[in-house]
């Protein structure tokens, strides 16, 4: 365990994996976002309600992308940032056939933003019902609001 006398960053929505993944034998302290040095780093977002931890859009990659983008918008707002401040997104798909519906959703949310983007097809995500995961990095809307 590491103790800091003065925080160098701000953690948003901390949680432990034993609560999020009760079926797995894990105990990791994580959070949904970290603000450090004027940058907002988001945890990959999936088709899950952040408050209830319930999966949504099961079997529907576009619906899961919609929830992931809504989560991203909400977390960025909590961090003092916004969708327009996104500089990079990474998209993980469990099937290449999901690319068009997922990117259509993402394109609607990020119209006019022009972030850099990386897309990957992976064998699986943390739960079998999750078809897409989107993570994002953004800058603070007003850099004096966060970081240290």
Image (tube, helix red, strand yellow):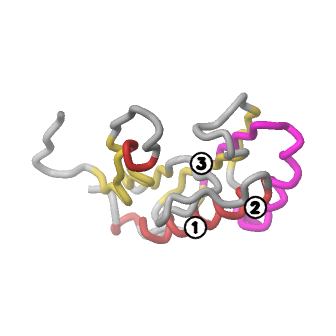
Query: Within 10 Å of the Cα at label 3, are there few (<14), some (14-19), or many (20+) other Cα atoms?
Result: some
Instruction: Identify the residue under disc 1.
Output: 73
Sequence-earlier tag: 3 or 2: 2
Residue 35 shown in magenta: no
Q: Is 85 drawn above or below residue 92 in the view shown?
A: below
At a point 72% along the width and 31% down the height, the residue shown is 122
Q: Please tell me the numbered disc located at residue 63.
A: 2
Query: Within 10 Å of the Cα at label 2, are there few (<14), some (14-19), or many (20+) other Cα atoms?
Result: many
**How far from the left and from the top, in percent, is residue 42?**
50, 51
Which of the 4 quarters of the picture holds residue 4?
top left
- Spatial CA span between label 3 and label 2: 16 Å
- Spatial CA span between label 2 and label 1: 15 Å
Instruction: Identify the residue under disc 3.
Output: 135
Sequence-earlier tag: 1 or 3: 1
- Spatial CA span between label 1 and label 3: 11 Å
Q: Specify whether 68 is left or right of 139.
A: right
Query: Within 10 Å of the Cα at label 1, are there few (<14), some (14-19), or many (20+) other Cα atoms?
Result: some
**How far from the left and from the top, in percent, is residue 110?**
72, 64
* Disc 3 to disc 2: CB gap under 8 Å: no
Between label 3 and label 2, give the one nearer the viewer. Answer: 2
Q: In this view, which residue lies farthest toward the left? A: 5
At a point 66% along the width and 60% down the height, the residue shown is 56
Q: Please tell me the numbered disc located at residue 144.
A: none
Q: Which residues are magenta?
A: 87-114
At a point 75% along the width and 40% down the height, the residue shown is 93
């Amino acid at each position: 365990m590491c103790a800091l006398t003065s925080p160098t960053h701000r953690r948003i929505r901390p949680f432990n994996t034993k609560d999020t993944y009760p079926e797995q034998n894990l105990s990791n302290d994580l959070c949904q976002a970290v603000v450090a040095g004027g940058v907002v780093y988001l945890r990959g977002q999936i088709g899950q309600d952040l408050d209830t931890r319930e999966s949504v859009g099961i079997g529907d990659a576009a619906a899961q992308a919609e929830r992931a983008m809504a989560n991203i918008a909400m977390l960025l707002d909590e961090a003092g940032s916004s969708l327009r401040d996104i500089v990079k997104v990474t998209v993980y798909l469990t099937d290449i056939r999901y690319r068009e519906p997922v990117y259509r959703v993402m394109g609607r949310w990020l119209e006019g933003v022009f972030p850099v983007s990386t897309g990957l097809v992976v064998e699986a995500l943390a739960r079998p019902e999750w078809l897409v995961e989107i993570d994002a990095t953004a800058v603070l809307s007003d850099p004096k609001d966060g970081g240290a």
